[in-house]
Image (cartoon, rainbow, N blue to C red):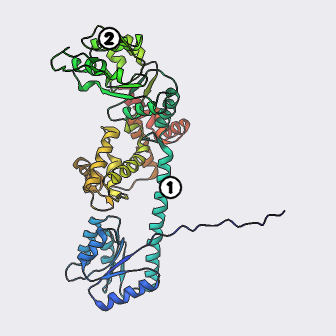
Amino acid sequence: MAHAMTKPIEIATPKVTLTPCILDDDPGQLELLAEQVGTLGYEPIPTSDPEEALRLVRIGRCRMVFADVRLPAMNGHAFLDKALRSDPGVHVIVMTDEYTLDSALDAIRRGAIDFLPKPIDKMRLKRTLDDAAALYDQRRRVKALEEQLLRDLEFHGIVGKSPAMLEVFDFARKVARHYTNVLLTGPTGSGKELVARAIHQISPVHQHKLAVCNCSALVDNLLESQLFGHMRGSFTGATDTRPGLFEFANGGTVFLDEVGETSLSMQAKLLRVIQNREIQRVGSPEVRKVNVRLIAATNRDLRAEVLAGRFREDLYYRLSSIQIRLPSLAERLEDIPLLMQFFLKKYADAYGKKICGLTRRAQTAMLQHSWPGNVRELENVLSSACITAMGEFIDLGDLPEQLQRRANLPGNGEDWRPLSLDEICAQHIHKVLEICKGNRLRAAQVLGIGRTSLYRYLKRDGIERKSSLQTAH
């Protein structure tokens, strides 16, 4: 029996609905332009009140405004400034009866999309509207693709596409299958606790509890009670008997953050847990058996701490048999845009706001910052910015003062000079080498090029000689 050939159904992707606002104090011009826009397939909102137009921009009802340059209550340039402060992504087209090249350039410099002479040519009006609609439709599709990419690159609440982070994810998956101790190293704020939680979630004991303890937050006596438990009356304030985290998470995982801050006596007790799988509650002679996976984290160089006599060598070797190093944010610069998108979505949803992204100047300020506090600092900045942002885009004024000051430094604007692509390339390679502390293999990974290509760049631009001299000093 022959089957009829069926044509696949094509589902058309709907375009973004663009609602232009027309702002003009002349009723005749207002009616005429609204009629022209309507015949081109758009639904305009005409008004002669600048405050009403600004309200429509603030609530996101209109993303495009045709504003007459001469308004009694507020001239077109003042309206343009206020509209861009409300929504830096809005398209403002300034209209005028007296067109000059200087006035057009002035409007463009202020942030206008175009400067149109009256009466407006219908073909130019159509092109302006269609270009804006196509741009918003493109942005919508790009945003959908970015969201899909974000989902694909998320690893149990951690996002990253840099070689360094993909290596962390891969090693964490391998380690998680085996019930063994793990040491996580890396600078403060790099996400060690998130990796510890991810390892537990994909481990064979994920159905059991994960207990978390910050060792640097408690003095020795309290830390011992927190980890091992205590008996009633064993110390002042011990009004009842309580189990510690090792008993609480028996069969599961205990995560000890900042283990490098513990005293030598506490390290000896931790070593006993690892070696003998047993604990003693404070004030009790009874030895209790526990079976836990220990994940420890530190921002210190434990090998150096061992040499200095501040960390037990036997405990170090017990913990570091499996070691995962988390890179700083400066070592994974290519992850910053992805992290910004992740945190914007997280906190926009948390605060019930519709935030589409950052303005270009805000993005520039974020990318120029050195992020000494790593991912935690980036998250805190975007969390605060989502609270203060009034429109759909986070602008420079929503960022902390130190980022605003850096963006406004003379070198970022007034002293700018045009550079050739070769000069920009050489400067960028030199900066990445500095960040990677001269490690050329790591620099090549960050730059997304092969090591041979990097050597060729270094030799051609003379960076190799300079960097080797700096390393020697």
Looking at the image, is 148 positioned above or below residue 304?
below
| Residue 44 picture location, percent across and down | 38, 80
Instruction: Please name whichever residue, 208 or 463, is drawn nearer the observer in this view of the structure.
Output: 208
Q: Write down the residue under mark 1.
A: 145
Rate crowding at label 1 as few (under 14), some (14 to 19) or many (20 or more) other CA atoms within 10 Å.
Answer: few
Name the quadrant containing residue 37: bottom left
| Residue 305 picture location, percent across and down | 32, 17
Looking at the image, is 13 positioned above or below residue 283?
below
72 vs 90, left or right, is left
Label 2 element class:
helix
Looking at the image, is 396 positioned above or below residue 23?
above
Rate crowding at label 2 as few (under 14), some (14 to 19) or many (20 or more) other CA atoms within 10 Å.
Answer: some
| Residue 177 picture location, percent across and down | 52, 27
Looking at the image, is 423 positioned above or below residue 214?
below
Q: Residue at x 26, y 25 (%)?
A: 216
Instruction: Please name whichever residue, 331 or 129, is drawn nearer the observer in this view of the structure.
Output: 129
The furthest residue to the bottom? 28
Q: Write down the residue under mark 2.
A: 268
Residue 434 in view of the camera: no
The amino acid pointed to by label 1 is Leu
Instruction: Please name whichever residue, 416 or 160, is drawn nearer the observer in this view of the structure.
Output: 160
